[in-house]
Amino acid sequence: MRWENLTDESGGHGRTPDGALFGADAVVTRTFDTPEFKGITFHEVRARSILNRVPGASRMPFEWTVNPYRGCSHACVYCFARKTHSYLDLDTGLGFDSQIVVKVNAPEVLRRQLASPRWGGEHVAMGTNVDCYQRAEGRYRLMPGIIDALTERANPFSILTKGTLILRDLDQLVRAAEVTDVGISVSVGFTDAALWRTVEPGTPAPERRLDVVRTLGEHGIGCAVLMAPVIPFLSDQPAQLRDTVRAIAESGATSVTPLVLHLRPGAREWFMSWLAEHHPHLVTRYQRLYAGGSYAPTWYQRRVTRQVHELAREYGIGPTRAGATRRIRPARSDERPAEPEPTQLTLM
């Protein structure tokens, strides 16, 4: 694996852009003989930088991210981040699902970078590459230290997750929201159990994720839902969209924003292999729909978005304005209640 030659081409904050992200002498490979980690190998590294600048050409509505893990045991067949494993000479298919890179010093590196005079306190997004609350987090417990580091500096941040493990850190999130702006979003693209078992086999069930939305709301933390991905011909029928939006509304989500499946190189090959095995009759239709590149045609995306927004209005929730930051700081007893603001959604 190319540990020493892997560089942060975007020029991470507080370091030179041509330095290796971590050195080969700092890599420790482990396996654990427990059912939840069966077949998974962990590569523990000591990162030299943890704040990552988002490329200027990105569609993301934020500039900085923190990703304590590479690879993801959620094993979502469509995950766009699969391509990143090729940078380490790791397989983007099963290797992405089972070879997990863990930046074991992420909290301490983040604390140091946030303390730099050059850091301006910009919003930091998490869960935008792979899930920071995947199963590995249950063992390595990196997120509590990361949240504490951001809270100490009153640095605004957001988290996007499919993991129920975020509830472990509920008290810390509430404390963070007392001093800064915090946005929480949960990804639920559909509620079809049969589809979930094959396309997102390592994730908690959709209803468990919606329980997270419900629990956060009960503790005063409004939670948005990124309805992603909407999978063409498999989860995009009107009845399916209605069932999903209804369940999202019943969970108390503050907003719902749909995102149609996109198939970038790396993810595209793996997804199409899965499609050929489970739904061979759809292969030709996908080849036509995605003939123009990684994204479905604009007309198709607009149709899905319109349907979801209409259903959201029917059920009393709405879309999120791109780039807006949601404030969930609890009001003090001497403050007037603030008007609700839109929620920032990060993209998978």
Image: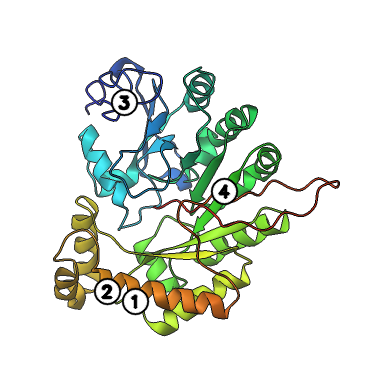
Mark 1 or mark 4: name the one nearer the start of the chain.
4
Residue linked to disc 4: 183
Where residue 265 sits: x, y (%)? 19, 51
| Crowd band around label 4 with a 10 angstrom C-alpha radius: few (<14), some (14–19), many (20+) | many
Where residue 187 sits: x, y (%)? 47, 58
Mark 4 or mark 2: name the one nearer the start of the chain.
4
Q: Mark number for residue 303?
A: 1
Residue linked to disc 3: 11
Q: In the image shown, does 81 or 17 lie closer to the viewer?
A: 17
| Crowd band around label 1 with a 10 angstrom C-alpha radius: few (<14), some (14–19), many (20+) | few
Q: Mark number for residue 299?
A: 2
Which residue is at 52% across, 21% downward? Answer: 108
Of discs 4 and 2, which sits in the foreground? 2
Which residue is at 69% across, 46% downward? Answer: 329
Dots 2, 1 in contact, CB < 8 A: yes
Mark 1 or mark 3: name the one nearer the start of the chain.
3
Mark 3 or mark 4: name the one nearer the start of the chain.
3
